[in-house]
Every structure is written in C-alpha cells, then in structure tokens.
Image (tube, helix red, strand yellow):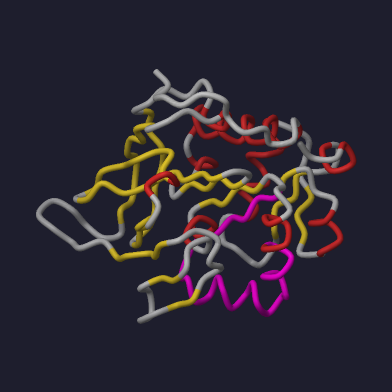
Amino acid sequence: MLHSNFMNGPIVVLDYDAGNLRSVARAVAHVDIAPVVSADPSDIDRAAGLILPGVGAAADTMANLRSRRLVAPIKDYIAAGRPFLGVCMGLQALFEWSEEGGHQECLGIFPGYIRRFEPGEGRKVPHMGWNTVEWVREHPVIEGIPSGSAFYFVHSYYPVADDPALVLGETSYGVTFPSVVARDNVVATQCHPEKSSTHGLRLYANFIRWARAGAPLPQAAGVPR
C-alpha cells in the first residue's frame, strides 16, 4: 500500500511528444479530474498514478525519453511499487528490446521483446481497427469489462512475453498475442483505451481508482465473465 501523500496526488500523463498524448489526457479528464501533463520529475514524484502514452516507432519513443532524461524517473517510479499504466508504445517500451529498426533497446521492465506482424491472407500490417480482448485472469483495472470486449488497435508490432504470468488479456490477429499485460503495480495495453468508447473509459477509470487505493494486488485468480 502506498503512502497517502502519493495516493492523494495527481494522475500524471508523461509528456515526451507522444502523438496520442492529448487524447489520453482528455480520456482521463472525462472520468476524473484533469491530469497533469508533464515531463518534470517532480510531478512524477508526486503522482498517484503515472501514464506513459505513445504511438509511432520504438526508436523515436526511446530517443525522446532519453533526451528528456525520463528513463531513470520511470524506472525509479516503477521500482518503488507505484501505479503505472502504459498505452500502445507505452506497453512496447516496457519490454527489453524491439525488432523495429533492427534491434532497439527498450526499458527492460518486462522480460521479452517486440516482434513485427507477418502479413498474410486477409491480414494487413499494421493491425488497425477494432478487435477483441479475451481476459485470462482477473485484475482491478479490467473490473466490469467483459471478456471478449472490443478495443481499438493501431500497431505493426506486438509483445512476446517471456513470462506467461505477465499476460492479462489476449488478442488474435494471425497470431495470438498479449494485448494487455500486468505485473504488480504495472499494467499496459497494446490497444488504445482512449479510442475504445465505453470499455476504454472504464479501463482508465478503473486504473485511477486502483491507483488512488494504493494499487492493491488482486486477491483471486480466474477469468472474469
């Protein structure tokens, strides 16, 4: 359980020029008070919950995080057990490396890497549009969202998790891949909740409630229905 000073802090959306920064901030404001949009380490330090948005290339994402000296504050925040949500590239950046651009080193929070989709019959790359997410276990951040709900995706790469216990939700697009991952205080989605109507807003609302409760870990395993 987090100290109450953190739990009473703002929700911070990390500003590193991500393309979906404003839409994520608007979604948070829709379900809560307006978040703090910032790259200031002092704002990260006082956050009740930290959201890392992102679209585009892994190399650009990591270059922008490094140029703004945000890599260490992100890792320190997560290591302290504080609530973190990654969105799209914010999920991919959590893994060790990406195939994009040959071999792009990422944050290394989760074991595994990011692989490119192979185009196939009736399957274009990027994976773009609505697709379903099947939950494989319970978690407070997906409470009230039925398994098989549709979310909006735009991506050419997907995570390959070395630890199956990371997987919270799965989606099929030629391959079945982890579309939502979670471990301890960290949750991340490959889909875009801010573009996913009611279920996406519910996910943001659940994350904020979970963060302000001190990110308690789920007590029971199983698949929500």
Residue appearing at x 42%, y 21% in the figure: 224
Task: Say whether residue 59 is left or right of residue 184.
Answer: left
Percent of width and height locating residue 138: 47, 28
Q: Is residue 206 left or right of residue 6?
A: left
Residue 131 position (above or below residue 38): above
| Horizontal and vertical percent position of residue 18 | 59, 63
- Image coordinates for residue 216, horizontal then vertical, percent: 67, 32
- Magenta stretch? 50-74
Count up the numbered dots.
0
Q: Which residue reaches farthest right?
A: 5
Residue in the picture at 81% in, 64% down: 41
Q: Which residue is depicted at the point 76% across and 36% down?
A: 1
90 versus 11 height, above or below? below
Q: Nearer the viewer, residue 61 or 210?
A: 210
Looking at the image, is 61 positioned above or below residue 158? Answer: below
Residue at the far left: name it. 121
| Residue 36 lies in the magenta stretch | no
In the rendered image, which quarter contains the C terminus? top left
Q: Going by the picture, which residue comes out furthest to the top?
A: 225
Which residue is located at x 62 percent, y 30 percent? 206
**Near-viewer residue (29 or 134):** 134
Taking the image as shown, residue 168 lies to the left or right of residue 35, namely left
Expressed as whole percent of the image width and height from the top left, the position of residue 21 reads 63, 55
